[in-house]
Amino acid sequence: MPKPPPLILDQNSPAFSSPDAAAHAYSSNMGKKGDAGEKAGVILKDPEGKYRYSTTLDGTDENFQLHAAIPKGYTFAGIMHSHPGDDARGQVFSPDDIHTATNLKVPSYISFLESGEVRKYIPGQTKTQQMTDPASKMPLNVARGDDLDIEAGH
């Protein structure tokens, strides 16, 4: 897969008081039920402590590759992507999703297109579980994810 162009701050992104609120709003950019490929982006914390989202990029039906251009004064605050699948694996955080969030030490947000839900995985906090991979019959470490806390809103 060729390296995609860097994600940049979406100039239309409002400022949110929490990364969960930003992810909830950002999910509208992640596609809709029936879409074939994943979409991905990042959540950034601005110099005033508010959260904004980046532009999005298209991935394949099962993965994506991204890199982001983070503006001066901003920090990397989370990963966001979609799961378009309607099978059991498409409804959970995969081992790769968990691994990536853990390595980057940021929350991972997924917009599950089949159900319309957005959930988060927080490294070291969100519970994981075993699931048998339907194709290989091997056990996988996955997570359902946690519900978003969007009470704080904008």
Image: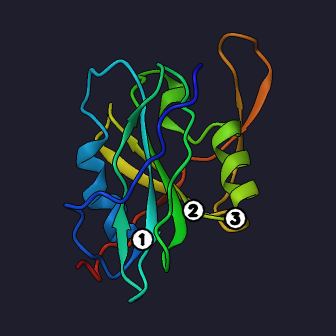
Asked if the residue under mark 1 is in contact with the one under mark 2, i.e. CB atoms within 8 Å, the reply is: yes
Which residue is identified by label 1?
A: 19
Q: Which residue lies under the disc numbered 3?
A: 105
> Which of the two discs, 2 and 1, labels the residue nearer the N terminus?
1
Quarter of the rendering containing residue 37: top left
- Looking at the image, residue 154 sits to the left or right of residue 67; the answer is left
**Amino acid type, mark 2:** Pro
**Element class at badge 1:** helix
Q: Which mark is residue 107?
A: 2
Distance of label 2 from label 3 (alpha carbons):
7 Å
Q: Bin the neighbour count of mark 2 within 10 Å (Cα to Cα): few under 14, some 14-19, many 20 and up.
A: many
Vertically, is 72 above or below 101? below
Considering the image in quadrants, where does the N terminus appear?
top right
Residue at 45 percent of width and 67 percent of height = 44
Tell me which label, 3 or 1, sits earlier in the chain.
1
Q: Quadrant of residue 131?
A: top right
Q: On the picture, is 55 further left or further right than 120?
A: left
The picture places residue 106, in percent across and down from the top left corner, at: 62, 64
Residue 80 placed where, x, y %?
45, 50
99 vs 65, nearest the viewer:
65
Position in image of residue 59 (x %, y %): 46, 27
Q: Label 1 is placed on what type of residue?
A: Pro
As drawn, the label of residue 130 is: none
Element marked by disc 3: loop
Which quarter of the image is occupied by the C terminus? bottom left
Residue 86 rendering spot, x and y as whole percentages: 40, 22
Residue 31 sits above or below residue 42 on the image:
above
Residue that lies at the very extreme toward the top in this rendered image: 135
